[in-house]
Image (tube, helix red, strand yellow):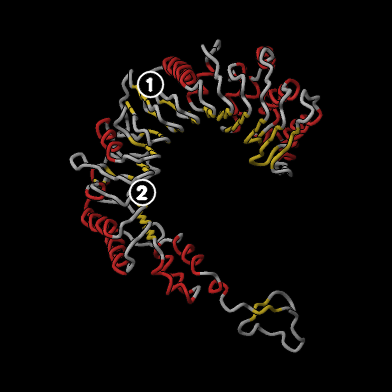
Amino acid sequence: METSGRNHGRPTDGELDAGEGKRHKLTTDRLSELPDLALVHILSLLYTEEAAKASVLSKRFNSLCNSVDSLNLTDEFSGKKGEIFIKFVDDALGFCRRKFIHKFSLEFDYEYTYKKAVDRWLEFVAQKQVKSLKLDFNHKRRCQMHLNWIADTTYVLSNILHENVNLEELVTCSCDFPIQTDISCRRLRFLSISQSRLDAELFSRILGGCSVLETLELRHCTGFDKLKINSSSLRVLRIVGEQLTSFWPIIGENSVLELSGPYLVSLEVSGTLYKTKFRLTDVGSLVSAVMTFTIKPPLGSGSKALQVAEEEIAREVLESLRCVKQVTIGGSIIKGLSKHEDYNLSSPLSKLRSLTLCIPITEWSQLRIATLLNSSPYLESLVIELSYCAAMCVVEHAKVTDDKYYWKSWSTISRCPLLHLKTVKLVGFQVSCQSMKPIFEFLEFLLRNSKALEEIVIHASRYVTRAALDAAMKLLDIPTASPDVIVQFEPPHLWIDPLCMYKELAPWFFT
C-alpha cells in the first residue's frame, strides 16, 4: 500500500519499509494463526533448548510446549559441555509434565563419569513409555576413523532392553549391548546399531529378544564374521562399513564375512570391510540388493592378492543375486568385474529388472558391461552413477582410453537384442569431453540398437565444459532403433564452466 507524501520518515509500529515511498502493515502474529497441531509439529522437530527459545516467536508456543511429545537433547548447539550439559538435561526432564513421550533423542560425548546420569535418564525414558529412542554418545568423534576402542567412551545398555514393551524404534551409537541381562523388546521393529562390538552369540540373542524386528542396521560395528538370520520378521538388513579396533588392524588371510537370511527382502552392504572374502548364502527371498562395499586387504599383502579376492567376490556375489530384481553394485564388485578379462556368469541374471552401477569415471573403460547386459536378458532400467577423482587422474584416464576396446565389447552386446531395456539414467555428468567419451559411445550404441528404449536421462551435477556439452548434444542427432526414445537433460538448462574459456586460452596455467 502506498503511503502519502507527508510521511517519508521511519516506518511506524506495525509497518514494514518495502522500498522508497512504500510501506506494508505487518500481520499481528502469523504463527499464532496456525492450528495447534501444526505448531506442536514444528516444536517437535526442534532441539529442546531451541523449542524453549521459540516462545518469543509466538504467544501460543508457551502454552503448547507441554503438548510436545518429543525431547531432542544435544550438546552440539547448546554450548553446554560436561557437567553443565548434565545439569541442563536433568532440568529439562524435571520440567517435563507429560505422562507419555513418543520420541526421546540424546546426543553428547559420553564419558564413564556420566554413567549414573545416563542411567537416571533411561529410567525417565522407561517411565514415560518412550516408543522411539536415539542414544548417540559419539557424534563428535565420528570423523576419527570410527575408532571406539577407548574403554570409557562406551555405555552399556542394561535395564532399558529388559522386558521393554514400549520401544518400537531404537538407534544407538557407542552403546554396548549387555552380555548377562536378557534382551526382550517385544514391539521393537527398527534397530540401528553404530560403533559397537557384536559377536555371533550376542547377535543371536538380540534377534531372539526382538521377535517382530523388521529392519536392522549395523553401522561401523565389529566382532562378527557370520550373520545367520532365521527370523521370519526381519526383512531389511543394512551393513555400513566395519569398525577399526586399532590404528593398525591385523586381518587374517582367510577373514570371511558370511551372510545368510532366507526371509530377507532387502540387503545393503557398503563402506569398508576389513575382510578378504565376502559370501552370501540362502538369500532366495531378496528383491533388492545394494553391494557397494570395498574390502581392505591384510597388511603386507600385494595388489595381486587383492585383485584375485575381488574377482572371486564379484563372481560369487553376482551368482548369489541371479534371482534378485533390483541390484546396485560398486566398490570391490566393480573392480572385480573390471579386472577379469574373460568374466562370464555360469547362469544369467534371469530376474534382474533394474541395475545401478556406482563407478568411478576412471574405471568405466575397464568395466565388462557387455557381459552384464548379456547376462541380464530382461533388464528394463539401467542407472550409471559416476564418481570422480582428482583432475590429473581424469586427464591420465583420457590419454589411455582405447576406442577399439569399446567397439569390441559392442560386438559382444550385439548378441543380446536388449528387448526390454526402457530407461537409462546417467548421474554425475561433468568434467571434460575426453573423460566422458567412452560413456557417450555406450549411450550411442544403446540408441542405435535398443528397440524398446524409451528415454535416456542425463543428470548434470555441476558445471560442464563446452566440449562435454557439445558431445552430449550430439546424442540428439543419432538415428535410433526405437521410434519413441527421447534424450533429456536434468536440469534442462546446463551451465558452462566459467573457467572453460580461460582453460582454452591458457591451458598451461591449469596443468
Q: CA distance from mark 2 to mark 1?
A: 36 Å
Residue 425 location, x and y as percent? 65, 33
Which mark is drawn over residue 386?
A: none
**Earlier sequence position, callout 2 versus callout 1:** 2
Q: Which residue is mark 2?
A: 168
**Image height check: is 378 above or below 95?**
above
Residue 367 seen in this snapshot: yes
Q: Amino acid at mark 1?
A: Thr
Residue 25 location, x and y as percent? 66, 79
- Label 2 Cα neighbours within 10 Å, binned few <14 / some 14-19 / many ≥20: many
Give the structural element (helix, strand or loop) at label 1: loop
Give the structural element (helix, strand or loop) at label 2: loop
Q: Residue furthest bottom?
A: 6
The answer to which quarter of the image holds residue 130 is: bottom left
Nearer the camera: disc 2 or disc 1: 2
Residue 269 location, x and y as percent? 44, 31
Side (left or right) of 20 relative to 240: right
- Label 1 Cα neighbours within 10 Å, binned few <14 / some 14-19 / many ≥20: many
Which mark is drawn over residue 276?
A: 1
Front in this rendered view, residue 489 or 183: 183
- Counting the numbered discs, the total is 2
Contact, mark 2 vs mark 1 (Cβ under 8 Å): no
Instruction: Give the position of the N terminus as an image quadrant.
Output: bottom right
**Image height check: is 477 above or below 492?**
above
Residue 64 location, x and y as percent? 43, 71
Task: Please tell me which residue is depicted at 73% across the width and 20% down the height of the picture.
Answer: 449
Q: Amino acid at mark 2?
A: Glu
